[in-house]
Image (cartoon, rainbow, N blue to C red):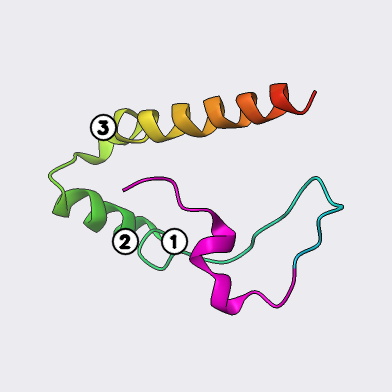
Amino acid sequence: MGLVLLTERHAGEIAGVLSCYDRVIVQGTLPVFCYADGMTAYLKKRDIRIFDFTQFAKPLTDAIKAHAEAMAAANG
């Protein structure tokens, strides 16, 4: 699955867009992940040991960091 913009994913729920701000704080919860047993169950279902979480999350972490750095470089 490719990258889907937040504004595309939730287009039906967005009433407007402010384009003058350079930061957005998104608050909420991910019910599956918001507590230890939920995260453990998610990883266990995918045969990932809880102690291997850092290796599991590293590709996503690296992709987010690279994208943020590219956007920062593109915008000076």
Q: Is residue 12 within the magenta segment?
A: yes
- Marker disc for residue 59: none
Circle 3 packing at 10 Å, graded few (<14), some (14-19), many (20+), is: few
Q: Which residue is mark 3?
A: 52
Q: Is residue 7 within the magenta segment?
A: yes
- Marker disc for residue 34: 1
**If you read the primary sequence from the N terminus, does the residue marked by circle 1 or circle 3 appear first?**
1
Separation of residues labelled 1 and 3 (CA atoms): 18 Å
Question: Mark 2 and 1 residues: CB-CB less than 8 Å, in contact?
Answer: yes
Quarter-wise, where is residue 35 in the image? bottom left
Question: Mark 3 and 2 residues: CB-CB less than 8 Å, in contact?
Answer: no
Circle 2 packing at 10 Å, graded few (<14), some (14-19), many (20+), is: some
**If you read the primary sequence from the N terminus, does the residue marked by circle 3 or circle 2 appear first?**
2
- Element type at marker 2? helix
Magenta extent: 1-16
Separation of residues labelled 3 and 2 (CA atoms): 16 Å
- Element type at marker 1? loop
Separation of residues labelled 2 and 1 (CA atoms): 7 Å
> On screen, 2 above or below 36?
above
**Residue 38, percent across and down?**
31, 61
Q: Which residue is mark 2?
A: 38
Three-letter amino acid code of the residue under disc 3: Asp
Q: Residue at x 62, y 31 (%)?
A: 68
If the image is split into quadrants, where does the C terminus sit? top right
Q: Residue at x 81, y 62 (%)?
A: 18
Foreground residue among 26 and 32? 26
Q: Residue at x 77, y 28 (%)?
A: 75
